[in-house]
Image (tube, rainbow, N blue to C red):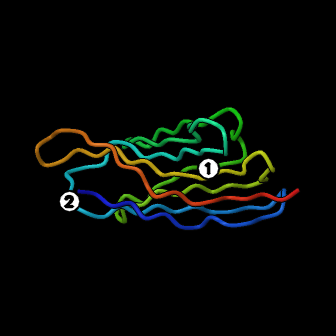
């Protein structure tokens, strides 16, 4: 079993910055991919950014050039640096890990969510 603990959300003015963190603990063989998703009220959860084990990253068009995903593999932690925040970035942000267990099967885990609010 893997537990994900998120931190770093909060209230910020438009144009400001926040950094989200998500640390994984528990038993697993390796991490295949990590990512951040968000869900605004009344909307479906959407992908924000992902990073795979080789370091390649992928971003939603709406955050390209403003958000940066990174990881510290030694700490089993993924980060999301969010700059130039806009009111439309307001949402609950969820981290996502895809790990390979000792039985070599892949499992997907979600964080509990952290709220990001951007005031105009």
Residue located at (67% from left, 58% from top): 116
Q: Look at mark 1 in the image and give the residue it sits on.
A: 68
Residue 7 vs residue 16, the one in the foreground:
7
- Residue, far top: 61
Q: Quadrant of the C terminus?
A: bottom right
Of label 2 and label 1, which has the lower sequence position?
2
Which mark is on residue 27?
Answer: 2
Q: Few, some or many C-alpha atoms within 10 Å of disc 1 (few <14, some 14-19, many ≥20)?
A: some
Under circle 1, the secondary element is strand
Under circle 2, the secondary element is loop
Q: Few, some or many C-alpha atoms within 10 Å of disc 2 (few <14, some 14-19, many ≥20)?
A: few
Q: Left or right: 85 with respect to 39?
A: right
The image position of residue 114, as x and y in percent, is 57, 60
The image position of residue 2, as x and y in percent, is 28, 57
Q: Is there a contact, CB below 8 Å, between mark 2 and mark 1?
A: no
The image position of residue 9, as x and y in percent, is 62, 64
The image position of residue 109, as x and y in percent, is 35, 49
- Residue, far right: 120
Measured Cα–Cα span from mark 2 to mark 1: 27 Å
Residue 98 vs residue 52, the one in the foreground:
98
Q: Quadrant of the N terminus?
A: bottom left
């Amino acid at each position: 079993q893997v537990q994900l603990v998120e931190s770093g959300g909060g209230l910020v003015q438009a144009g400001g910055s926040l950094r989200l963190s998500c640390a994984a603990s528990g038993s697993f063989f390796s991490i295949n991919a990590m990512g951040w998703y968000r869900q605004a009220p009344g909307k479906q959860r959407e992908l924000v950014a992902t990073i795979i084990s080789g370091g390649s990253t992928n971003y939603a068009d709406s955050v390209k050039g403003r958000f940066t995903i990174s990881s510290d593999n030694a700490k089993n932690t993924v980060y999301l640096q969010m700059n130039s925040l806009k009111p439309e970035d307001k949402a609950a942000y969820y981290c996502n890990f895809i790990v390979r267990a000792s039985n070599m099967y892949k499992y997907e885990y979600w964080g509990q969510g952290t709220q990001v609010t951007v005031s105009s």
